[in-house]
Structures are given as C-alpha cells and as structure tokens.
Amino acid sequence: MNIVLIGIQGSGKGTLVSSLEKHLDLNVISTGQLLRDEVATGSALGKHIKEIQMNGGLVELDIVMDVLNKKLKSNNKKITVFDGFPRNMEQANALDKLAKPDIVIYLNLTKEVAVDRILSRLTCSKCGQIYNTKRINTLVCPNCGGKLEQRFDDTIESINKRFEGFYKDTYPLIDKYKKDNVLFEVDASGTPDQVAETCLRIINEHNN
Ligand code: AMP
C-alpha cells in the first residue's frame, strides 16, 4: 500500500510519520530528509542540494528520483509512506508509474499556524524526531540523546519561498487525487495525537 502525505510546510507531516511508525511497520520515504542526508555527507552533490534547500527551491527531478529509487529498492515493507513527494504534477506522474498512491492524506493547516510551528521546530540531528520549543525545554533528544537543532533551511526567506511553491505547484495535486478517488483531507490544527488517530483510522480502514 502506498500512502502520500501532502501539506504545507509545518503542517506536521514529519511528526505524523513518527506517530504512525509506532503503530505500523512502514517504509518511510521523506525526500527532504533523504536530501539532507546527502548534504550531511559533505559531498559536491550535497553542497549543490544545500544551496537549493537554503533558498527554498526544488531540487532537480533526476536527483530526487535517484535518492527516492535507492530507498524504494531497499524496501521490504507492505506500507510505504511518501513525505514531501510528489511536490508538483511532473513528480505526481512519475510516482503514478512507480508506485501508484492508494491513499493521499492532505494535512490542511493555515499558513499562520504553520509559520508559528516551523519557527518553534527543533529536529534531532541523530534520529530525526521533531519537537516544538513550546513543549520541550532541552536541546538533548529525549528519544536518543542526540542534539536538537533548528533546520538550516527554516529561515523566514526559505519558508516564504516554500509556501509560494506549495500553493503554486503542490496544491493543484489535491484536485488530481480527488479525481483519482484517493484523497482524504485531515484538519492538521489538532494535537499530534489527534491527527495521528484520524490518519490511523483512515489507513486501517483501507488496509484489509
Ligand atoms: P522538506 O523536508 O519536505 O520540507 O524539504 C526540504 C527541502 O528539500 C525543500 O525545500 C526542497 O528544497 C527539497 N525537497 C524535498 N522534497 C523535494 C521534492 N520532492 N522535489 C524537489 N525538492 C525537494
């Protein structure tokens, strides 16, 4: 089963993935994280990717497909979750050929709440777990002891550029997936537990 998560930056896709992983055996393909992993190697490709990410732009399709395909090939799980892919119609068409989505969850959240969440977001440099500075008072990950830090691309300039890209290129996918009869819209303004519970119900109803 292939699940796609769509939502504005800050809508809680990464947090939702962590919650779902506690209940389901998942192969998670987070293109943003896979690209950041390449940045962390310090390679020439990583430097190129970092520059694009800092500006909030989209990394070239061939590079994204390369990291995505590598992760997909090493998969032996029944459920795959795509977080951050597809981001436009070209990528959606590529995904249809590779792994047609069975469920697309649209995490609906206002831009104002999303900005607030992004600016108070801390990510563990070791395990990738996401926290909110309003709910945690340490820079040590309670999950693994790793260092909690702000994402290098969570600057106001990059955030605004990513929002622009979302409404222009990603938002139209909602119509496509509605027509494909696979779209589920979820109110993402609730607590992480509330959002996860709603999404788990949707997934379990379709996972028989
Ligand atoms: P995210 O972790 O989803 O917020 O993505 C962080 C950054 O990684 C984005 O701003 C893009 O620069 C890049 N990125 C992530 N996913 C994609 C994708 N599907 N296509 C192109 N670039 C991507």
Image (spheres, rainbow, N blue to C red):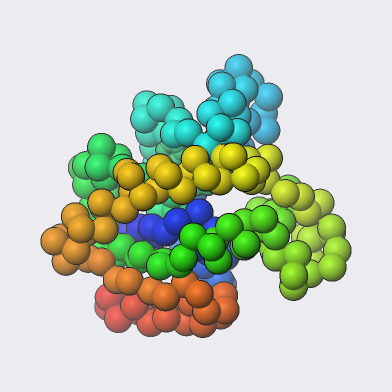
The quadrant of the rendering that contains the N terminus is: bottom left
Vertical order, 129 against 135 (above or below): above
User: Between 58 and 206, which is closer to the camera in this rendering?
Assistant: 58
> Which residue of the protein is positioned furthest toward the left in this rendering?
179
Which residue does the image show at 65% across and 43% down from the upper left? 155
**In the current view of this chain or complex, which residue is farthest to the top?**
44
| Residue 37 visible | yes
Residue 86 in view of the camera: no
The answer to which image quadrant residue 207 occupies is: bottom left
Quadrant in which the C terminus is drawn: bottom left
Q: Position of residue 183 (x, y in %)?
A: 25, 66
Q: Is residue 136 left or right of residue 174?
A: right
Q: Position of residue 168 (x, y in %)?
A: 33, 45
In the image, taking residue 106 as reference, residue 48 lies left or right, namely right
Q: State the image quarter where residue 101 is shown.
A: bottom left
Residue visible at 71% across and 56% down in the picture: 122
Relative to 107, residue 98 above or below: above
Q: Residue at 52%, 79% (x, y): give it.
A: 190
Q: Position of residue 109 (x, y in %)?
A: 45, 67
> In screen coordinates, is 100 left or right of 31?
left
Q: Foreground residue, 51 or 28?
A: 51
Residue 132 higher or lower than 40, as above or below: below
Dividing the picture into quadrants, the one containing residue 105 is: bottom left
Q: Exactly how many numbered labels are in the figure?
A: 0
Q: Is residue 37 left or right of residue 32?
A: right
The x, y position of residue 148, in whole percent, is 78, 54
